[in-house]
Image (cartoon, grey):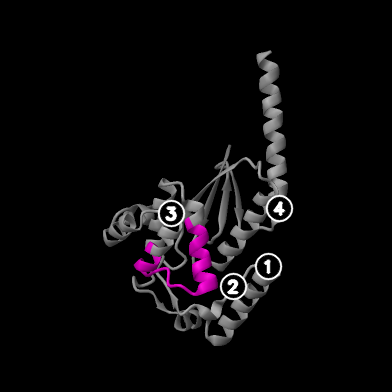
Amino acid sequence: MIKLDILSDPICPWCYIGKMALDQALGNAPDHPFTIEWHPFQLNPDMPPEGMDRTAYLQAKFGGPEGAREVYGRIEDTAKAAGLPVDFGAIQRTPNTLDAHRLIHWAGVEGRQIAVVSKLFEGYFTQGRDIGDREVLVEIAQAAEMDGEMVRRLLASDADADDILARDAHARERGVTGVPTFVVANQHVLSGAQPPELWEKVIAELREQIADQNGRNSSSSS
């Protein structure tokens, strides 16, 4: 298997678009060689713990309502062209995502990471759920077959918060400035949402490399 590390934030629309494109390619290649792990990167590391009003956040970030509409209009068009349902109007608050990243980490320990990441994206972008709300995170964990009471207790503590922040800082030190960022085999970096066709090409090339390596190993041992 080949490691595919994905740096992402569950409130990043391009991360959602990029995930769905990758999922499509993986669905078309069920024998793909990837083992996938999701890693933390906060788009807004200085966001207050309680988050902030979505409209105020967008206007501050994009220089007013016109700028926000222009940017998110393009994102919405891209999402819809890819057949991805989004409802930006349903989002009332932009959350701090530290707790969401902690949940993703714990889900990885239990082998539930992909399910939790999917439910975070869907909850935020299609249902407008506040994924900074710990009870919402508990519900998402339970929907992914995690122990909700355990997650509730962990969220009430500071468990793994420093680790998440350190991993985020390490990614920035290595030059990551935006997400999604995909790292293949700890060597090759792809930045931004990539189309399914590119992932299908990458998978085909990796299969060929693996087959060639297996062939050489077989020849050397015979």
Report the magenta residues as a range.
116-138
Label placed on residue 27? none
Q: Residue 145 carries which label?
A: 3
| Residue 205 image offset from top left, x and y in percent | 71, 41
Asked if the residues shown at circle 1 and circle 2 are in contact, with their CB atoms under 8 angstroms apart, the answer is: no
Report x, y in % for residue 180.
56, 59
Q: Mark 4 points at which residue?
A: 198
Find the distance from the CA under tag 1 to the CA under tag 2: 9 Å
Quadrant containing the N terminus is top right
Label 4 SS: helix
Which of pointers 4 and 1 lies earlier in the amino acid sequence?
A: 1
CA distance for labels 4 and 3: 32 Å
Residue 175 visible in this rendered orientation of the protein? no
- What's the amino acid at mark 1? Gly
**Which residue lies under the disc numbered 2?**
86
Q: Does the magenta segment cover residue 208?
A: no
